[in-house]
Image (tube, rainbow, N blue to C red):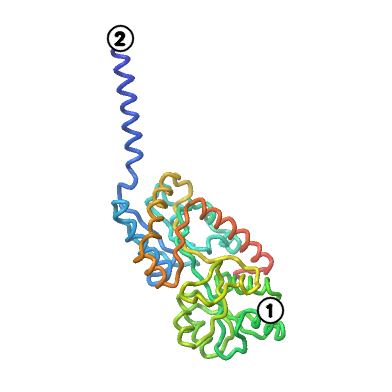
Amino acid sequence: MCLNIAASAVLTSVGGLAKAQGGAQDVYPSRPIKIIVQFPPGTTPDTLARIVAEYLQPRLGQPVVVDNRPGAAGNIAADFVAKSTPDGYTLLLGQSGLTWASALFPKLPFDPLAFAPISVLAGVPFVVTVRKDLPVKSVQELVAYAKNNPGVLACGTSGNGSPQHLLAELFMNKTGTKMNLVPYKGTNLIMPDLIAGRIDVMFSAADGVLPHIQAGRVKGIATVDNRRLAALPDLPTLAESGIPVNTMMWVGLLSAPNTPPAITRRISDELRSMKNSPAILQRVSAAGNDLRVDGPDEMRKTISKDHEVWTQLIRDARITLE
C-alpha cells in the first residue's frame, strides 16, 4: 500500500515536471513583442524594424510592434532595452554605433556590448561621394589629390562620433591623407552643400546618395563595405581600390543581456527565411540596404571585430565628444 502510494507520488511528480518543461518550451511567445528603435520614424533602421515586425508577427503568432525612442545618439533606446526583463519581449533594433559607444561615452549606465545578439539584419553601405566638379574619378585619384593638397579638401560629417566622421577618420588613417572635417547637425544638411560645391567629400549612406549619383549631381567613387552595392554594381569597394578597409555599417536585432539563448535562437531561425522572400529582398534593397540575416554567433563575432576596430581608431585619432 505504502509502495503504491510512493510510486504514484513519483509518477505524479515526474508527470508534472514533464508538463512544466513542455510548457516552458511552448510559452515563448505568449504575449506581444516590442522592437525598440534608436531612431525616429522614416529612418533606415525604422524601415527595417517595420519590415521585421511584419515578417515575424505571423510566424511567432503574437503582435510585434515598433516603438521609436530616439535621442542621445541612440543611447535612450539602448538603455531602455538593457534594463528590461531578459525574456525576449523587448528587443532592440540597434546599429554599428553600439560597438564604439563605450569608447565615446565612458559613463554610460549600461554596457553596449552586453546585449544578447539575435541577427545582423542588413548591411548599410556607405559611398565615398565627391562634388561633381572635383577633378577625381577614383579613390586612387582622390588620395593623390588629398596628398597634394593636405588639409584643403572639406569633408562633411554628422558631428563627432557619427558614422560619417569615423569613416572619414578611417579613410585618412589608411591612406595617410588629411582632410578638413566639417561637422553638421544632421546628414540631411550635408548633401545640399556637397551638391552646391561648398564641401568636397562625404561618406554617405547609400540610400541618401543614390538618387543624386544617378542624377549626376554628385559622383560616387567607391563603396565602404565588404562587397559591392547591388544598386551601383560598377562601383568598386575601398578594398578593391587598394585601400585596406574591409568593414561595414550594419543594423541588427538584439535582446536584453542574459536573454536565454533558446529565445534568441528562435527569433533568429524565423528571420533566416527572409532571404528566401523576393518581396523582402526588394523592400530592403529599395531602402538602400543589403539583406544579411546572420545568426547570433555570427553577429557576436561582428560586434567583437567592430568593437576592436572602432575603439582603436577612436583612441588613435583622439576623438572625443567635447
Q: Amino acid at mark 1?
A: Lys
Judge by depth and name the residue closer to the eye, 99 or 59: 59
- The residue carrying mark 2 is 2
Near mark 2 (Cα within 10 A), the count class, few <14, some 14-19 or many ≥20, is few
Identify the secondary structure beneath mark 2: helix
Is 182 on the left or on the right of 73, as rendered?
right
Identify the secondary structure beneath mark 1: loop
- The residue carrying mark 1 is 178
Q: x and y percent of residue 273 in the render?
A: 38, 56
Classify the position of the C terminus by image quarter.
bottom right
Residue 157 visible in the displayed image: no
Q: Residue at position x 55%, y 70% from top? A: 163
Q: Amino acid at mark 2?
A: Cys
Spatial separation of the CA atoms under disc 1 and disc 2:
88 Å
Q: Residue at position x 49%, y 86% from top? A: 192
Q: From this viewpoint, which residue is outermost toward the front?
A: 234
Classify the position of the N terminus by image quarter.
top left
Q: x and y percent of residue 260 in the render?
A: 44, 44
